[in-house]
Amino acid sequence: MINLTNYHVYIGKKQILKDINLNIKTPFTLLLSGKNGTGKTVFMNSLLGFHKTKGKKIFPYKKIIYIPDTPFFTEQFTVEEVLKTYRYFYNISIKQMINILNSLNFTYPLSYKISELSLGSRKKLEIIPLFIDNYQLYLLDETTNHLDKETINIISDRISNLTDTIIIDHNQDFINTLKNKNKNIKEAVCREKSIILSS
């Protein structure tokens, strides 16, 4: 669940979002929409404590998967180095991650550098954490960029089986697929420095 009352978000002294009032009960899939620059990612980051906030916040999650729109790895990383980093943070075996990649039709050797991968394959590496179980909340920021329809369908199936998820995505086909598969969809719009539930 997420409960926000008179919630404000700041970057430095600048107020980015104001007067947010949300009460969302578990289970939920929250779709955040709005024009670029309206504060969607800032809001997501504020829930994780990355920005100064004021107001009441009930956010009881301890085990969270966060997949940002920009990956942590550079083009000089190898695939294997990315997997080893995930192993360290998420306590998941290399074998399990290879199985996840196989299910996503990832075909590159572990020795390849990120610079040698297609954009879609880079994104498949980024979304590995989405398929790690036993987390309470999944935060997904533009996870479908450069992905084929088959992979997007796999992602939507996975999300439909999760308890609580917050999603930022501009892919309307993906959003429509989620709505068709998921009964717990909530939609919120970022505009005029606030976030308003629309469904």
Image (cartoon, helix red, strand yellow):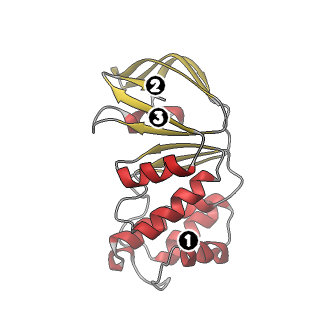
Residue at x-position 38% and y-position 74% = 114
Q: Residue 100: where, in percent of width, then height?
A: 59, 72
Circle 3 residues within 10 Å: few <14, some 14–19, many ≥20: some
Among the 4 quarters of the image, the one containing residue 87: bottom right
Among the 4 quarters of the image, the one containing residue 193: top left
Q: Can residue 141 be seen in this view?
A: yes
Tell me which amino acid carries mark 1. Leu
In front: 153, or 76?
A: 153
Q: Can you tell which of label 3 and label 2 is closer to the viewer?
A: 3
In this rendering, the answer to whether 180 lies above or below 191 is below
Farthest-out residue, front: 180
Residue at x-position 68% and y-position 72% = 93
**Label 2: which residue?**
52
Q: Residue 198: where, in percent of width, then height?
A: 44, 27
Label 3 vs 1, first from the N-terminus: 1
Residue 116 in the figure: left or right of residue 59: left
Could you give the CA–CA distance between mark 3 and mark 1, rounded to whole angstroms?
33 Å
Element type where label 2 sits in the image: strand
Farthest-out residue, right: 134
In front: 98, or 75?
A: 98
Q: Residue 123: where, in percent of width, then height?
A: 42, 65
In front: 92, or 152?
A: 152
**Label 3: which residue?**
187
